[in-house]
Image (spheres, rainbow, N blue to C red):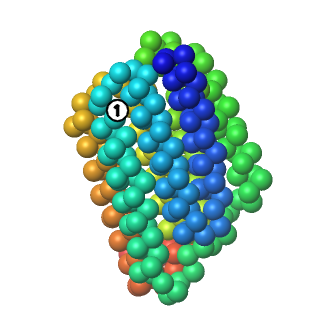
Amino acid sequence: MSMFGYPLVNVLGACLIITSMMVVLARTGRAAACLYSLQSLVLVGVLASLGAVTGSGELYTWSATAFATKVVLVPAILLFTLKKIGGEVPVDLPPKLNPMKSVALVAVEVFVCFVAVSGIDLPTAAAVKPTLAVSLAHFFIGLTCIVIQRSIFKQIFGYCLMENGSHVTLALLAPQAPELVEIGVATDAIFAVVILAVLVARMARYARTLNADDLCELKG
């Protein structure tokens, strides 16, 4: 199983990078929410595959929790926020970088993470170094999403990508971690998304803009 399982984990890790780029490059908030749900489904596959390879029953619980929270609940919260905002203010603002520059920047980040991981010698991550590099790259991809997006609604997805990356890193390095750890990670993510969604909705209602450049000029 391990001969088949670890390559599968690494293939799914590559899919995480592809789907994260799709989230960053999505033209609309609705498309980004749907693509984030797709990426989270890939994350569920990574966790379940790791569970099968390592024999960790905890990871099966993690995958079920991730499905409920990341595939279903978080996208639903974001789509509800979009519906609540309605047409009051523009949500789908163009990013600060064009798609080609964004892809090039992400490629550099992934390369740097692969170089960094190549020097790590951990028994728990020896067979899944590509996926470990991907999980670390997710932090920088999420940060990139926050920096290049003008729409503060789309910036929420940057946080979500960073959180997905930390989720995978934890699963790779500590597959036997108790379910309580997963509950803590999932709960923090949901509360953070709810708070950010409420802030975005209030900004749309009172500031009448979701443009981060405009909001930087607010005083007090």
- Asked if 140 appears above or below 121 in the picture, the reply is below
Q: In this view, does 92 lie to the left or right of 103?
A: left
What residue does disc 1 label? 59
Q: Where is residue 91 shown, x and y percent of the image?
A: 55, 76
Q: State the residue at coordinates (77%, 53%).
A: 100
The crowd level at tag 1 (other Cα within 10 Å; few <14, some 14-19, many 20+) is many
- The image shows residue 131, relative to residue 88, as above or below, that is above
Q: In this view, does 156 lie above or below 137?
A: below
Q: Position of residue 217 (x, y in %)?
A: 52, 74
175 vs 75: above or below: above
* Residue occupying the point 32% across, 56% down: 190
Q: Which residue lies furthest to the left in this view?
A: 180
Q: Where is residue 38 in the image (x, y as percent from the top left)?
A: 53, 53
**SS assignment at label 1:** helix
The amino acid type found where label 1 is placed reads: Leu
150 vs 137, nearest the viewer:
137
The answer to whether residue 102 is visible is yes
Instruction: Report the quarter where the C terminus lies.
Output: bottom left
Q: Can residue 219 be seen in this view?
A: no
